[in-house]
Image (cartoon, rainbow, N blue to C red):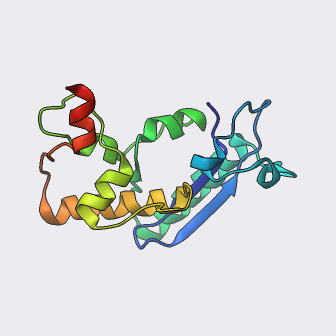
């Protein structure tokens, strides 16, 4: 598994960073149908994960200074991104951990499902994955929780049918 793209948005939904990361080795399958990233997209990309981590740290520092407070990182299954960036940061809000399906304690709700059910936001549609869209959806989900509280969700039918 390799982190190939990063997007950072602020609480207003403004994109502060969107960049591709040069793979460290040969990629066997880009999963372009899911990621939206092709070999052509990566041609000439020299930015390393270390450089991106430094860019994100600089953004966080600038945002903290502007707000005169602490920046909370928000994402979905954020531990994977932080691990790939080799960065330990706190505080975080992980939307994958905020929500649960009733009766399925080991099932992590997907971001697209949460966005559609709670925000009436259709993600991706016919398009491929967008890390910027994911980041925005996470921000909107946290705002939704702050306004409406946490609720256990009924599981999607396809999750229940797989278990039964």
**Left or right: 127 as drawn, with respect to 116:** right
At horizontal 55% and vertical 61% (from top left) the residue drawn is 127
Q: Residue at x 54, y 54 (%)?
A: 129
Image quarter of residue 100? top left
Of residues 139 and 56, the one drawn nearer to the viewer in this rendering = 139
The answer to whether one can see residue 159 in this image is yes
User: Residue 75 location, x and y as percent?
Assistant: 41, 49
**Relative depth, front residue between 34 and 141:** 34
- Please identify the quadrant where the N terminus is shown: top right
Examine the rendered structure and indicate whether residue 84 appears above or below residue 120.
Answer: above
Task: Name which residue lies at 67% across and 49% down.
Answer: 52
Q: Position of residue 124 (x, y in %)?
A: 48, 60
> In the shown orientation, is residue 10 left or right of residue 49?
left
Q: Position of residue 137 (x, y in %)?
A: 39, 61
Tag count: 0
Q: The C terminus appears in which quarter of the rendering?
A: top left
* Residue at x 37%, y 57% (from the top left corner): 138
Q: Is residue 31 shown above or below 36?
A: above
Identify the image quadrant of residue 152.
top left
Query: Residue 74, percent across and down?
Result: 40, 52
State whether residue 86 appears in this view: no
């Amino acid at each position: 598994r390799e982190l190939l793209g990063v997007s950072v948005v602020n609480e207003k939904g403004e994109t502060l960073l969107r960049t591709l990361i040069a793979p460290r080795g040969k990629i066997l399958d880009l999963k372009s149908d899911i990621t939206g990233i092709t070999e052509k997209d990566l041609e000439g990309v020299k930015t390393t994960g270390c450089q991106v981590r430094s860019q994100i740290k600089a953004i966080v520092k600038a945002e903290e200074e502007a707000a005169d407070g602490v920046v909370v990182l928000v994402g979905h299954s954020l531990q994977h991104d932080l691990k790939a960036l080799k960065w330990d940061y706190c505080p975080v809000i992980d939307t994958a951990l905020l929500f649960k399906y009733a009766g399925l304690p080991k099932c992590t709700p997907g971001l697209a499902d949460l966005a559609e059910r709670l925000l009436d936001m259709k993600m991706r549609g016919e398009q491929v994955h967008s890390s910027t869209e994911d980041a925005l959806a996470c921000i909107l989900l946290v705002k939704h929780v702050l306004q409406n509280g946490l609720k256990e969700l009924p599981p999607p039918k396809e999750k229940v049918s797989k278990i039964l």
